[in-house]
Amino acid sequence: MFILFSFLFSIIFVILDLIFFKVFQLENYKTVSYIKRVAKFQFAFGTKTPLKATKRIKRLFFCDFLVKFLCFSLIFAFLKAWICVLLVTILLLTSDYFVLISFLFMMPIEGLIKQNYIKKAQKKIAAVDCKIIAITGSFGKTSTKNILHQILSEQFRVCVSPNSFNTPMGVCKTVLENLKENDEFLILEFGARKKGDIEELSKLFGADYAIITPIGACHLETFKNIQTIENTKFELCENTKNFVVFNDGARKLYERFNGEKYLAGESGFCFVKDISFDKDGSKFDVVIGEKSLSLKSVLLSNLDNVAVAICMAHLLGESFENIKRGVLGLKPTPHRMELIRGFANVIDDSYNSNFDGFLSALKVLSRFSGKKIVVSPGIVELGNMQYEINFKIAKEVKKYADVFVIMNKTNKIALSRGAEGMEVYFASTREEQTEILKKILGAGDVVLFENDLPDNFA
C-alpha cells in the first residue's frame, strides 16, 4: 500500500513542481538566479512564455519524480501517521528546493549529454567545411544576423541559427538540424551572461569571421559593469581567424583590436547616410570604401546593422548588384521594429530589451503622425543601475510620445517618476493593457510595443 501512496503523492507533487521547472527554464538553468526568483516568490504564473517540453526538462521531471518517490516511500514505510503528515507538509513547503536537488543530481548526466552533442556538431562542421561568421555584442545580434543572412543568400549558400540560439546547445541544435552539406557559410550568434562564455563558444565551434554589434548595459546582474561586458565580447576578436567587422556602437573595441578590422559607422569603411522614411519604409545611401549605393528597404530602423551586413557581404566577395537586391528584399525580424498597419499603426519591438534600442525606436515613432503611445515594462537585469536607466527611459518616452502605458510592477516606480507630467496608465496584465488601448486609440494613431518581459517578472 505504501508504494501506491508514494507513487500518487510523487505524481501530484511533481505536477505542482511544473511552476518551478518553468522558472528554472526561464533562468536558463542558472542555480543562483533560480534561488533568487524563488526567494522573491517570482513564480512565472503567466502564459507569455510557456514551459517548453524539451528533452532536458523531461529528464529533470523524471529525476524529480524519482527523488520524491524515494522520499515518500521511506516516509510511508517506516514512520507513524502524524510524522508522515508533518514530513509531507515540509516536503510541500520545500518542493522548490527539491527541484534544485534533482537538478544537481542530473548535472553529471547533462554534462555527458552536452559533450556528446558538441562532438557531433564539431564533426559535422569539419565534414561540411563551411566558413563560420560569428556575431556577438550587447544588442542587435539577432537583427544583424538575419539581415546578413538575407543579403548573403543572394549569392551564397548560407545556414543561419534560428531565433536567438546563442548558447553551446543552441549552436549544436543549429548545426545538427539545419546545416547542409553544400552550405558555404554558417552564421552563428554568440551570447554571454558571464566572462568566458564567448571564448568557450569560439573555441568549441571556431570563427573564421566576426561581427561585433553595439556594446551597452545588458545583463549587468551577472556582468556587474560595462568593462566586463567589453572584455567578454572582445574574446571573439581574440579568437577570430580572419577579419572582424565592428558596428559603430562597438568603436571602443574597434580601436582596441590590432588585427584586420573594418568599422561600419561614421568615418568608417562602410556607413549609411541621407536617410529618409515614408509609408513604404526607408531610403538611404550606403558608402562602401570608394563606392556608394542608393538603396531602399521596408526596414524602419537597424540601418546601422544593414551597413554592418553589407560590409561583411562585400568583404566576402558578394557583388554590389546582389547586395542591392538583398537589401531591397529584406524583411523585418519578427518583433523587432516590425510595422503592422491597420486602424492604428503598430510598431512591434517587443523583443528589444536595451536602452539604445529603446531610444532608436522612440525616434522612429516620432516620425509618425497621430497620437503616439508607448507600451512597455522597461528593462530588467541591470543590477544596481536598473532604477536609473528606467528613469532615463521614461524621460525619453515623455520627449517623443503622448501616452505611456507601463506594464508590470518591476519598474513601475522608476518609469512613473520619469514620465511624470505626461499621460500615464498602468496595466498588470495583457487584458488590462487591451482595455486601456481600446479607450485611448483612434484612427491613424501609432503604438510602440517595447520589450515584453517573461513571466518571472511581475
Image (cartoon, rainbow, N blue to C red):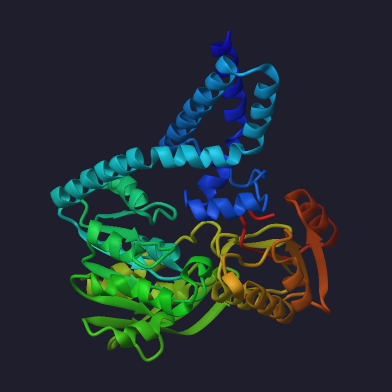
Identify which residue, 374 or 82, lies in the foreground.
Answer: 82
* Residue nearer the viewer, 331 or 72: 72
Q: In this view, does 132 lie above or below 250?
A: above
Q: Residue furthest bottom?
A: 267
The answer to whether residue 292 of the structure is visible from this angle is no
Splitting the image into 4 quarters, where does residue 157 fall? bottom left
The answer to whether any part of residue 104 appears in the image is: yes
Count of number-bearing discs: 0
User: Residue 217: x, y in percent?
Assistant: 52, 74
On-image quarter of the C terminus? bottom right
Residue farthest to the right, as pictured? 439
> Which quarter of the picture shows residue 428?
bottom right
**Rendering coords of residue 302 (x, y %):** 48, 72
Horizontally, residue 87 falls left or right of residue 306, namely: right
At 25% from the left and 41% from the top, the residue drawn is: 116
Q: Residue at 24% x, 57% y: name it.
A: 204
Image quadrant holding the N terminus, namely: top right
Q: In this view, does 395 lie above or below 324?
A: below
| Residue at image coords 57%, 70% | 382
- Name the residue nearer the viewer: 375 or 236: 236
The spot of residue 189 in percent (x, y) is 36, 60
Q: Position of residue 444 (x, y in %)?
A: 74, 66
Q: Is residue 174 above or below residue 445?
A: above
Q: Is residue 55 left or right of residue 83?
A: left
The image quarter in which residue 420 lies:
bottom right
